[in-house]
Amino acid sequence: MCGRFTSLLTPELLTTIYGVTVPPTLAIEPRYNIAPSQPVQIVRQDISGKRELAHVNWGLIPSWAKDPSIGHSLINARAETVAEKPSFRASYRHRRCVIPASGYYEWQHLNGRKQPWYIKGQEDQPLSMAGLWEHWQSPDGSEIETCVIITTAANELLTPIHDRMPIILQHEAIDGWLDLSARLDDIAVVLKSCNQYSLEAYPVSNLVNNPKFDSPACIARV
Protein backbone atom coordinates (compact mmCIF):
# COMPACT_ATOMS: atom_id res chain seq x y z
CA MET A 1 0.00 0.00 0.00
CA CYS A 2 1.02 3.64 0.20
CA GLY A 3 0.11 5.51 3.37
CA ARG A 4 2.53 8.46 3.31
CA PHE A 5 4.62 10.15 0.66
CA THR A 6 6.77 13.21 -0.07
CA SER A 7 6.63 15.94 -2.71
CA LEU A 8 9.72 18.09 -3.13
CA LEU A 9 9.15 19.05 -6.76
CA THR A 10 9.51 22.70 -7.74
CA PRO A 11 7.02 24.47 -10.04
CA GLU A 12 9.68 24.49 -12.75
CA LEU A 13 10.17 20.73 -12.50
CA LEU A 14 6.41 20.09 -12.56
CA THR A 15 6.15 22.14 -15.74
CA THR A 16 9.08 20.34 -17.38
CA ILE A 17 7.90 16.82 -16.53
CA TYR A 18 4.13 17.14 -16.99
CA GLY A 19 3.65 20.08 -19.32
CA VAL A 20 1.42 21.97 -16.91
CA THR A 21 1.33 25.62 -15.98
CA VAL A 22 1.55 26.16 -12.24
CA PRO A 23 -0.86 28.99 -11.27
CA PRO A 24 0.83 31.68 -9.16
CA THR A 25 -1.96 31.27 -6.61
CA LEU A 26 -1.15 27.55 -6.13
CA ALA A 27 1.37 27.23 -3.29
CA ILE A 28 4.06 24.65 -4.05
CA GLU A 29 6.16 23.93 -0.97
CA PRO A 30 8.38 20.97 0.01
CA ARG A 31 6.37 18.36 1.90
CA TYR A 32 8.10 15.52 3.69
CA ASN A 33 5.18 13.69 5.31
CA ILE A 34 1.96 13.83 3.29
CA ALA A 35 -0.80 11.89 5.04
CA PRO A 36 -4.30 10.76 4.01
CA SER A 37 -7.02 13.46 4.03
CA GLN A 38 -4.43 16.18 3.35
CA PRO A 39 -4.33 18.23 0.11
CA VAL A 40 -2.08 16.82 -2.61
CA GLN A 41 -1.10 17.88 -6.11
CA ILE A 42 -2.42 15.94 -9.10
CA VAL A 43 -1.96 16.29 -12.84
CA ARG A 44 -5.14 15.65 -14.81
CA GLN A 45 -6.28 16.08 -18.38
CA ASP A 46 -9.70 16.87 -19.85
CA ILE A 47 -11.21 15.22 -22.92
CA SER A 48 -9.75 17.94 -25.16
CA GLY A 49 -6.23 17.08 -24.01
CA LYS A 50 -5.65 20.16 -21.84
CA ARG A 51 -3.71 19.41 -18.68
CA GLU A 52 -3.84 21.16 -15.34
CA LEU A 53 -2.24 20.93 -11.92
CA ALA A 54 -4.84 20.80 -9.15
CA HIS A 55 -5.00 20.43 -5.38
CA VAL A 56 -7.37 17.73 -4.14
CA ASN A 57 -7.72 15.79 -0.89
CA TRP A 58 -6.12 12.35 -0.58
CA GLY A 59 -8.84 9.76 0.08
CA LEU A 60 -11.39 9.24 -2.69
CA ILE A 61 -15.06 10.03 -2.07
CA PRO A 62 -17.18 8.36 -4.79
CA SER A 63 -19.73 10.68 -6.40
CA TRP A 64 -22.57 8.49 -5.09
CA ALA A 65 -21.37 8.45 -1.46
CA LYS A 66 -23.79 9.73 1.15
CA ASP A 67 -21.08 10.22 3.79
CA PRO A 68 -17.73 11.83 2.87
CA SER A 69 -15.99 9.94 5.68
CA ILE A 70 -15.72 6.97 3.28
CA GLY A 71 -12.69 8.78 1.88
CA HIS A 72 -10.69 7.96 5.02
CA SER A 73 -10.59 4.29 3.97
CA LEU A 74 -10.14 4.80 0.23
CA ILE A 75 -6.54 6.04 0.01
CA ASN A 76 -5.37 3.11 -2.16
CA ALA A 77 -7.07 1.17 -4.97
CA ARG A 78 -5.84 -2.28 -6.00
CA ALA A 79 -4.82 -2.48 -9.66
CA GLU A 80 -6.27 -5.97 -9.87
CA THR A 81 -9.84 -4.78 -9.15
CA VAL A 82 -9.85 -1.03 -9.89
CA ALA A 83 -11.72 -1.42 -13.20
CA GLU A 84 -14.65 -3.28 -11.58
CA LYS A 85 -14.94 -2.06 -8.00
CA PRO A 86 -17.93 0.30 -7.62
CA SER A 87 -15.89 2.87 -5.68
CA PHE A 88 -13.38 3.29 -8.51
CA ARG A 89 -14.70 2.05 -11.86
CA ALA A 90 -16.20 5.36 -13.04
CA SER A 91 -13.07 7.28 -12.12
CA TYR A 92 -10.92 4.63 -13.81
CA ARG A 93 -12.78 5.22 -17.07
CA HIS A 94 -13.15 8.99 -16.91
CA ARG A 95 -10.94 10.61 -14.25
CA ARG A 96 -7.41 9.23 -14.29
CA CYS A 97 -4.57 11.36 -12.94
CA VAL A 98 -0.91 11.36 -12.01
CA ILE A 99 0.16 12.12 -8.45
CA PRO A 100 3.69 13.57 -8.53
CA ALA A 101 5.94 12.43 -5.69
CA SER A 102 9.58 12.44 -4.68
CA GLY A 103 9.25 9.24 -2.66
CA TYR A 104 6.96 7.35 -0.31
CA TYR A 105 7.09 5.50 3.00
CA GLU A 106 6.35 1.90 3.87
CA TRP A 107 6.41 0.07 7.20
CA GLN A 108 8.16 -3.28 7.60
CA HIS A 109 7.04 -5.63 10.38
CA LEU A 110 10.28 -6.48 12.16
CA ASN A 111 10.61 -8.35 15.47
CA GLY A 112 7.27 -7.17 16.77
CA ARG A 113 7.68 -3.55 15.71
CA LYS A 114 7.18 -1.50 12.57
CA GLN A 115 10.26 -0.06 10.89
CA PRO A 116 9.54 2.81 8.46
CA TRP A 117 11.39 2.82 5.12
CA TYR A 118 11.69 5.57 2.55
CA ILE A 119 11.47 4.53 -1.12
CA LYS A 120 12.59 6.99 -3.79
CA GLY A 121 13.80 7.08 -7.36
CA GLN A 122 17.45 6.40 -8.12
CA GLU A 123 19.39 9.68 -8.31
CA ASP A 124 16.29 11.40 -6.86
CA GLN A 125 14.25 10.92 -10.01
CA PRO A 126 10.61 12.01 -9.42
CA LEU A 127 7.93 9.33 -9.15
CA SER A 128 4.71 9.61 -11.18
CA MET A 129 2.15 7.60 -9.22
CA ALA A 130 -0.95 6.46 -11.09
CA GLY A 131 -4.13 7.74 -9.50
CA LEU A 132 -7.81 8.51 -9.92
CA TRP A 133 -9.73 11.60 -8.91
CA GLU A 134 -13.37 12.23 -8.15
CA HIS A 135 -15.80 15.10 -7.62
CA TRP A 136 -18.31 14.89 -4.75
CA GLN A 137 -21.12 17.28 -3.91
CA SER A 138 -22.89 17.33 -0.57
CA PRO A 139 -26.65 17.92 -0.18
CA ASP A 140 -25.92 21.52 0.87
CA GLY A 141 -24.06 22.15 -2.39
CA SER A 142 -20.48 22.17 -1.07
CA GLU A 143 -17.97 20.38 -3.30
CA ILE A 144 -14.90 18.26 -2.59
CA GLU A 145 -12.37 16.86 -5.06
CA THR A 146 -10.40 13.83 -3.92
CA CYS A 147 -7.97 11.23 -5.22
CA VAL A 148 -6.69 7.70 -4.65
CA ILE A 149 -3.33 6.03 -5.39
CA ILE A 150 -3.39 2.77 -7.37
CA THR A 151 -1.22 -0.04 -5.98
CA THR A 152 0.04 -3.39 -7.22
CA ALA A 153 2.22 -6.30 -6.04
CA ALA A 154 5.64 -5.17 -4.84
CA ASN A 155 8.72 -5.74 -6.98
CA GLU A 156 11.72 -7.78 -5.83
CA LEU A 157 13.41 -4.85 -4.10
CA LEU A 158 10.38 -4.02 -1.97
CA THR A 159 8.89 -7.45 -1.24
CA PRO A 160 10.96 -7.86 1.98
CA ILE A 161 9.49 -4.57 3.22
CA HIS A 162 5.83 -4.84 2.10
CA ASP A 163 3.81 -6.88 -0.39
CA ARG A 164 2.26 -3.84 -2.13
CA MET A 165 3.58 -0.70 -3.85
CA PRO A 166 2.18 2.23 -5.83
CA ILE A 167 1.94 2.03 -9.62
CA ILE A 168 4.87 4.20 -10.72
CA LEU A 169 4.45 5.23 -14.35
CA GLN A 170 7.41 5.45 -16.68
CA HIS A 171 7.60 8.86 -18.34
CA GLU A 172 6.55 7.49 -21.73
CA ALA A 173 3.40 5.96 -20.19
CA ILE A 174 2.06 9.23 -18.74
CA ASP A 175 0.46 10.48 -21.96
CA GLY A 176 -1.49 7.26 -22.46
CA TRP A 177 -2.61 7.10 -18.83
CA LEU A 178 -4.01 10.63 -18.91
CA ASP A 179 -5.64 10.22 -22.34
CA LEU A 180 -9.34 9.84 -21.56
CA SER A 181 -10.05 8.60 -25.10
CA ALA A 182 -7.65 5.64 -24.72
CA ARG A 183 -8.95 2.07 -24.82
CA LEU A 184 -9.15 0.54 -21.36
CA ASP A 185 -7.24 -2.51 -22.58
CA ASP A 186 -4.35 -0.21 -23.49
CA ILE A 187 -4.54 1.54 -20.14
CA ALA A 188 -4.45 -1.70 -18.17
CA VAL A 189 -1.00 -2.69 -19.46
CA VAL A 190 0.70 -0.02 -17.33
CA LEU A 191 -0.81 -1.32 -14.09
CA LYS A 192 2.23 -3.30 -12.96
CA SER A 193 5.19 -2.88 -10.62
CA CYS A 194 8.09 -0.83 -11.89
CA ASN A 195 11.65 -2.04 -12.40
CA GLN A 196 13.33 -2.66 -9.07
CA TYR A 197 16.53 -1.02 -10.28
CA SER A 198 14.78 2.34 -10.74
CA LEU A 199 14.23 2.64 -6.97
CA GLU A 200 16.23 2.95 -3.78
CA ALA A 201 14.98 2.06 -0.29
CA TYR A 202 16.45 2.77 3.14
CA PRO A 203 15.21 2.82 6.76
CA VAL A 204 14.24 6.09 8.43
CA SER A 205 13.31 7.13 11.96
CA ASN A 206 9.91 6.88 13.61
CA LEU A 207 9.44 10.63 13.24
CA VAL A 208 7.37 9.95 10.12
CA ASN A 209 4.81 8.11 12.24
CA ASN A 210 3.45 11.47 13.40
CA PRO A 211 1.63 13.20 10.51
CA LYS A 212 2.18 16.56 12.22
CA PHE A 213 5.93 16.19 11.78
CA ASP A 214 7.00 17.50 8.38
CA SER A 215 10.71 18.20 7.89
CA PRO A 216 13.79 16.83 6.10
CA ALA A 217 14.46 14.71 9.18
CA CYS A 218 11.66 12.41 8.00
CA ILE A 219 13.74 11.18 5.07
CA ALA A 220 17.10 11.02 6.87
CA ARG A 221 18.75 7.59 6.83
CA VAL A 222 19.13 5.71 10.11
Image (tube, rainbow, N blue to C red):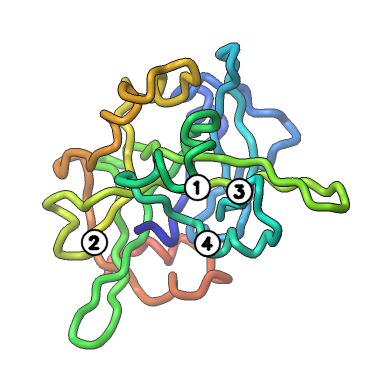
Question: As rendered, which of 222 and 120 lies closer to the eye?
Answer: 120
Q: Residue at x 29, y 79 (%)?
A: 114
Q: CA distance from mark 1 to mark 3?
A: 9 Å
Earlier residue among tags 4 and 1? 4
Mark 4: give few (<14), some (14-19) or many (20+) Cα within 10 Å.
many
Q: Image quadrant for the C terminus? A: bottom left
Q: Residue furthest bottom?
A: 112
Which of the 4 image quarters holds residue 52? Answer: top right
Q: Position of residue 1 (x, y in %)?
A: 34, 58
Rendered position, 71 above or below 93: below
Residue beneath disc 2: 202
Which residue is disc 4 drawn over? 35
Q: Earlier in the sequence, mark 2 or mark 3?
A: 3
Residue 73: x, y in percent?
51, 64
Q: Which residue appears at 44% of the width and 60% of the height?
A: 4
Alpha carbons under labels 2 and 3: distance apart: 35 Å
Q: Are marks 1 and 3 in contact (CB under 8 Å)?
A: yes
Q: Which SS class for mark 4?
A: loop
Location of mark 3 (residue): 62
Mark pair 4, 2: CA separation: 20 Å
Dot placed on the residue nearer the N-terminal end, 3 or 4: 4
Q: Which is more foreground, mark 4 or mark 1?
A: 1
Residue type, numbered disc 2: Tyr
Amino acid type for the residue under numbered disc 3: Pro
Closer to the chain start, of discs 1 and 3, is 3
Q: Nearer the viewer, mark 4 or mark 2?
A: 4
Q: Secondary structure at mark 1?
A: loop
Q: Which mark is residue 86?
A: 1
Q: Nearer the viewer, mark 3 or mark 4?
A: 3
